[in-house]
Structures are given as structure tokens and as C-alpha cells.
Amino acid sequence: MENTLQAVPQNWYLVLSTLLFCIGIMGVLFRRNAIIILMCIELMLNSVNLLLVSFSAYSGNSDGQVFVFFIMVVAAAEVAVGLALMMSIYRNAASTDINVLNKLKW
Amino acid sequence: MSLYLFLTLAILTIISALAVVFSKNPMYSVLWLIVCFFTIAGHYVLLNAQFLAIVHLIVYAGAIMVLFLFVVMLLNLNADTEPHKSNLSKIASAIAAGLFFVVLIASMRATELGEFNLPNKTNIGFVEEVGKKLFTDFLLPFEISSVLFLSAMIGSVLLAKKEKK
């Protein structure tokens, strides 16, 4: 697979990860279920990971891949805490609909 | 050859990401997200990041998505319990995301990307190279991330524990 870098222009990776990020944004705005919103945030984090890996590959420097590791660490921690929050919210409100969680709304 | 591979993977990624957003049933959303992560791992392999591809599969498809699946199953979420939203807000969110895409693409077109000399080194994604970087230049963040994990572990146990009456 050594010729991928020659065959595919880097702009295509930029467009692909931008598109993934925007799909994630659309999901966050569009869905009411808090678990799906967490999943869309994962999607956005992954689009950034893809961008970092593509820059790392096209510049021949593996620093970007180390950053991706740290993003994965943060994503894993975020998901663990977020899903624990979902569980306790569901226990109290019997729903994961974000319209129910409006106590802090002004 | 790798151009077609890239195009196939990219189309699969976009389709599965859209399916995550548009599935009525949360369970299908989780499964489509797993497909999306597999195609992203394919992109990593194409970009000479083999070790990262494996780690991505283990961490995301293996751990995070299993966590999501467990929670969706525990809460017994399905298409019937899925909250509905008005069509107006659906259209508004689609327009907002589309406009954001246009802005990002326009700013990307206006930016001068520095010309990279394509590297002839293809081993940057091997565990040896990444491990060397991780344990020399990035040693401090690596050790601090263990504290982050510990606090996340304690926090999620505390949050998910049943409250005493």
C-alpha cells in the first residue's frame, strides 16, 4: 500500500473528515436521544483522528499518531463517565430524552 | 488500486455515518457506528498507520461500542421509545450542518497548504516508531493519561452506583 499517498491527494482526506465532522454536528442537533448524541460526539472525535493521521502520513512524521492516542484516551474516559451519567439520569427521569432534562433551562 | 480502495472506504464511511444519524432504532445506530469505525480503521491502514488501526479497532469497536451496546440494551431503548422531533428543527439542523460544511470547505480552499515532499519512509505507523515517540517525547502526557483513566473509572463507578435513600 505504499502508493496510497501518491494516488490519493490529501485534500480528499480533508474533505472526508470535514464531511464526517458535519454529519456528527447534524446528529448532535438532530437527535433527541442523549445516547445517540454521545455517539455523534464520538463520530466527530474520529473525524479529527482521521485528519491527524492523514497529516502525519503525508508529512512523514509520527507525532500526529501519538496525538491520536491521547484523543482516544480522552474519548474512552469521556464515554465511561457519560454513560454512567446516562444510567443515573435514566434512573431518575426514566428517559434519555434531552427534552425531559430542562431543569437547568432558564 | 489504492485510489479505488480509498473511494470505496470513503463512501462506506459516509453512508454508515449517515445511517448512525438517521436510524430510528438506537440499536441500529450503535451497529452502524461500529461499521463506521471499521472503515476508519481501513483508512488508517491505507495511511500507513497499522498499529493505530489495530488500537482503534480494539479500543473503539471492542470496548467503547460494547459499552454503548450494553447501555442501550440495559435501558431497553428501541424505536418506540425514541423521542420525536418536529420537521422544522430537523430541516434547521440539516441546514446548520450544511452551512458549517460550506464554511469549512471555503476556508480550506482559501488556505495555502504547504507542499509536502511525499515521505519515502513508510514505517512511521509501526509500533516501534510510535512507541519510541510515546516513551521519549510524550512521556509526561502518557503518564498523566493514566491518572485521567483512574479518575474516570472512579467517577463512573460513583455516578452509576445506586443512591442510598
Image (spheres, coloured by chain):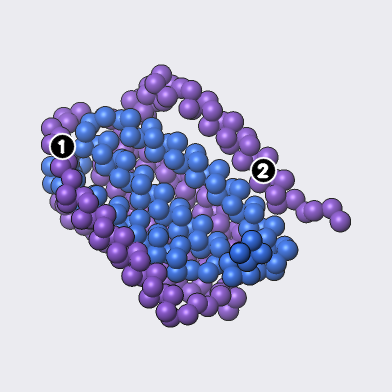
Chain colours: A blue, B purple
Label 1 SS: loop
Residue type at mark 2 is: Gly
Quadrant in the rendering for residue B135: top left
Name the quadrant of the N terminus of chain A.
top left
Asked whether residue B162 is in view, the answer is: yes
Q: Chain of mark 1?
A: B
Q: Earlier in the sequence, mark 2 or mark 1?
A: 1
Quadrant in the rendering for residue A58: top left
Of badges 2 and 1, the one in the foreground is 1
Rounded to the nearest angstrom, the CA distance separating label 2 from label 1 is 43 Å
Residue type at mark 1 is: Gly
Q: Residue at x 38, y 32 (%)?
A: A66
* Residue that extends furthest to the front in the rendered view of this protein: A106
Name the quadrant of the C terminus of chain A.
bottom right
Q: Which disc is residue B155 wearing?
A: 2
* Residue that extends furthest to the right in the rendered view of this protein: B165
How many residues crowd around disc 1 within 10 Å: few (fewer than 14), some, or many (20 or more)? few
Residue B17 vs A9, above or below: the answer is: below
Q: Residue at x 26, y 54 (%)?
A: B104
Q: Residue at x 30, y 30 (%)?
A: A62
Instruction: Report if the CB atoms under discs 2 and 1 are less than 8 Å apart.
Output: no
Q: Position of residue B155 (x, y in %)?
A: 67, 43
Label 2 SS: helix
**Marks 2, 1 in one chain:** yes
Closest to the observer: B30 or B94? B94
How many residues crowd around disc 2 within 10 Å: few (fewer than 14), some, or many (20 or more)? some
Q: Position of residue A45 (x, y in %)?
A: 41, 49
Q: Position of residue B84 (x, y in %)?
A: 53, 78
Q: Residue at x 84, y 53 (%)?
A: B164
Q: Which residue is mark 1?
A: B114
Asked whether residue B19 is in view, the answer is: no
